[in-house]
């Protein structure tokens, strides 16, 4: 939940003409601005933006609203996501809740994977300009009718024939091998050598809905049948194939404007259609259509037109897709490209008007499409015809909307001159059976989940009695997570140096800090020790070895604590350096850059979180005193102290990137 004061700050900062001007060309008309509406096709501007009132209104389609409403409508975002969009635009930090160390590391890992794929995309694009890239990759794109602007806009590239070119360049640029492997850009031989997954192929980057590079598809130019025509990225943390669609980032606005999405099969189908001017087109990237992909489309429209090849494979792919689309409550039509062509070749052979006219005349409702197709197979055989009618009735049963089911059942009865009551009965029976199967599947899944939970007790928040840390009783639960995170850095990285940049507020040319020294110095300056007794004992034990034996290695200090007589401290130390807690925070250990760089970012942040909690603790203590204080002068003094602490905490929160 975004705090109300943050919402107010975002709304105050958002100038409607600024926001809408990012998407349409506004022309001043007196005190207002005019434009052609981005929500429907028009030639005469009827879209008015009023800066004075902070609203927009289209007198053509009737849409109206505020800056937030425009972003919600145009980008198909929820209210919170629209607020976050505007916050990013105006540089306003939004912090809905405090991130745990694990959440910070997970986010950093995802950002690292994105950084690696974005580096790879730039590498492939640059490789297209090399001698080999021009002779092979660029020549191929030209042979497929793709213009230079299309190649540039969609980030098409070339993977060199040298199998170590990308991985070698990435490692030299500072990217770790494990991230090249984790993104699927590289593979490792049994002898430990690293090699590129993609080589000697034209490359198609796959974008997320927000435009981030998440994966790649590579097409070989060889005619050797033993070589796979396409090689695609494996699934990763940032790329789930069943939830991704090629071209969705470039198509989403057109899909919303036209309230329709054309679904094709391949990369080139999308590119050729977009280049022609039909931009509300996406592809399932050569995989069978999935429920996740349909739900992604549903974010932008309820209407899908499946546009596949007119051969047998294309027809059966369309039939498979119909059921999935209907089950999600969407409207589906089918248009088959003439046999011998696909959307790519058809778009290259015809003009925009010709393709548009063909689609408009060729689009068919799913019942008409399926009936005509199956009737041809049934011929005059009454049993086959009965099977056909049952098949269509079973397809209708997939629709969740009862009104739509009723309308289509009546259409089917009329088309086949069949008693509608019989069809209604078939649809009802099929639907009842389907819902029963879904209920049983849900129950089985719940039983499996319960069994797992019995075997693996759910992890509780570490602010409570901690199963991960030897059933620690936290005397100060609010401060426990912050103190625990500081102790984690000390126990795991205490002797490592913090190399601050010269522009950092922590930079001191006369001192080289270790993690342990840096944290201890801040705590000493703060005038306090760790409030939770077990953490304080581990802290004191660590520094007793640290100060008395300066040559002692980090693992030896940790081992000495774990071997000591304070078994509770030993168990707690073990929990922070091994097993579950290390596993949960290991993403930190795998930061893209050197560990010291990650420490420079995260140790100060952990300290700031601790300081924020300490200040809040003092404020609450003063507020409790204020409730019982009777002396007016003492009350005034407490109020002043609380106000000062509030300002201190505000500055800390600002450094953390949070909004008070």
Image (cartoon, rainbow, N blue to C red):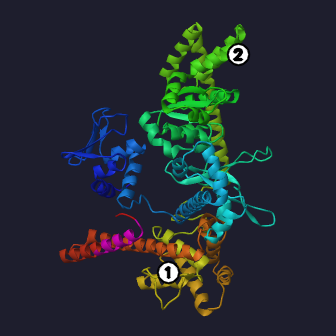
Element under disc 1: loop
Q: At x 44% / y 33%, what residue is drawn?
A: 259
The residue singled out by tag 1 in the image is 500
Most foreground residue, 285 or 300: 285
Q: At x 57% / y 36%, what residue is drawn?
A: 348
Up-down relation of residue 84 to residue 387 (above or below)? below
Residue 222 image offset from top left, x and y in percent: 74, 48
Image quadrant in which you'd find residue 92 = bottom left
Front: mark 2 or 1: 2
Element under disc 2: helix
The residue singled out by tag 2 in the image is 377
Whichever of callouts 2 and 1 sits on the residue coming sooner in the sequence is 2
Up-down relation of residue 128 to residue 357 (above or below)? below
Neighbourhood count class around disc 1 (C-alpha, 10 Å): few under 14, some 14–19, many 20 upward: some
Most foreground residue, 401 or 463: 401
Magenta stretch prevailing secondary structure: helix
Most foreground residue, 221 or 577: 221
Is residue 645 shown in magenta?
yes
Up-down relation of residue 399 to residue 38 (above or below)? above
Quadrant including the C terminus: bottom left
Magenta span: 644-657
| Residue 656 visible here | yes
Is residue 268 shown in magenta?
no
Residue 186 image offset from top left, x and y in percent: 70, 60
Neighbourhood count class around disc 2 (C-alpha, 10 Å): few under 14, some 14–19, many 20 upward: few
């Amino acid at each position: 939940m975004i705090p109300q004061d943050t919402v107010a700050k975002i709304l105050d900062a958002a100038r409607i003409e600024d926001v809408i001007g990012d998407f349409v060309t506004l022309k001043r008309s007196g005190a207002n601005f005019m434009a052609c509406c981005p929500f429907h096709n028009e030639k005469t501007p009827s879209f008015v933006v009023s800066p004075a009132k902070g609203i927009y209104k289209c007198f053509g389609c009737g849409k109206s609203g505020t800056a937030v409403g425009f972003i919600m409508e145009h980008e198909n975002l929820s209210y919170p996501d629209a607020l976050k969009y505007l916050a990013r635009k105006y540089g306003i930090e939004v912090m809905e809740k405090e991130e745990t160390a694990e959440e910070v590391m997970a986010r950093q890992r995802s950002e690292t994977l994105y950084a690696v794929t974005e580096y790879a995309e730039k590498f492939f694009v640059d490789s297209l300009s090399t001698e080999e890239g021009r002779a092979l990759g660029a020549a191929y794109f030209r042979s497929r009718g793709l213009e230079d602007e299309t190649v540039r806009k969609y980030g098409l590239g070339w993977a060199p024939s040298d199998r170590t070119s990308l991985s070698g360049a990435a490692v030299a640029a500072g990217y770790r091998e494990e991230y090249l492997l984790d993104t699927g850009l590289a593979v490792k031989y049994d002898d430990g050598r690293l090699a590129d997954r993609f080589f000697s192929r034209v490359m198609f980057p796959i974008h997320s809905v927000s435009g981030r590079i998440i994966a790649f598809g590579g097409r070989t130019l060889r005619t050797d049948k033993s070589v796979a025509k396409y090689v695609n990225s494996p699934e990763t943390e940032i790329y789930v194939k069943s939830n991704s669609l090629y071209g969705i980032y470039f198509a989403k606005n057109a899909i919303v404007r036209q309230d329709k999405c054309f679904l094709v099969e391949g990369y080139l189908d999308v590119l050729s259609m977009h280049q022609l001017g039909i931009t509300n087109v996406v592809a399932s990237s050569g995989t069978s259509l999935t429920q996740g992909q349909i739900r992604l489309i549903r974010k932008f429209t309820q209407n899908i037109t499946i546009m596949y090849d007119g051969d047998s494979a294309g027809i059966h792919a369309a039939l498979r897709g119909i059921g999935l689309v209907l089950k999600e409550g969407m409207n589906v039509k089918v248009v088959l490209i003439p046999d011998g062509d696909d959307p790519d070749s058809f778009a290259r052979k015809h003009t925009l008007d010709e393709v548009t006219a063909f689609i408009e005349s060729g689009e068919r409702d799913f019942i008409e499409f399926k009936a005509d197709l199956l009737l041809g197979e049934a011929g005059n055989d009454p049993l086959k015809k009965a099977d056909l009618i049952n098949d269509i009735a079973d397809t209708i049963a997939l629709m969740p909307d009862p009104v739509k089911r009723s309308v289509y059942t009546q259409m089917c009865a009329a088309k086949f001159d069949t008693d509608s009551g019989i069809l209604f009965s078939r649809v009802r029976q099929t639907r009842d059976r389907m819902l029963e199967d879904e209920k049983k599947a849900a129950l089985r899944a719940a039983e499996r989940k319960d069994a797992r939970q019995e075997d693996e007790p759910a992890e509780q928040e570490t602010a409570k009695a901690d199963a991960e840390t030897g059933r620690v009783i936290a005397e100060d639960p609010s401060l426990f997570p912050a103190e625990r995170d500081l102790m984690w850095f000390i126990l795991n990285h205490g002797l490592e140096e913090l190399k601050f940049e010269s522009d950092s507020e922590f930079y001191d040319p006369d001192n080289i800090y270790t993690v342990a020294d840096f944290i201890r110095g801040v705590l000493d300056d703060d005038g306090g020790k760790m409030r939770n007794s077990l953490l304080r004992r581990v802290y004191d034990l660590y520094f007793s070895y640290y100060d008395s034996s300066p040559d002692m290695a980090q693992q030896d200090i940790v081992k000495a604590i774990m071997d000591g007589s304070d078994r509770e401290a030993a168990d707690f130390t073990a929990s922070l350096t091994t097993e579950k807690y290390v596993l949960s925070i290991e993403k930190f250990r795998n930061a893209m850059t050197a560990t010291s760089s990650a420490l420079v970012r995260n140790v100060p942040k952990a300290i700031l979180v601790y300081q924020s909690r300490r200040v809040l603790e003092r404020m609450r203590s003063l507020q409790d005193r204020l409730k019982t204080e009777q002396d007016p002068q003492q009350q005034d003094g407490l109020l002043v102290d609380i106000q000062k602490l509030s300002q201190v905490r505000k500055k800390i929160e600002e450094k953390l990137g949070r909004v008070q």
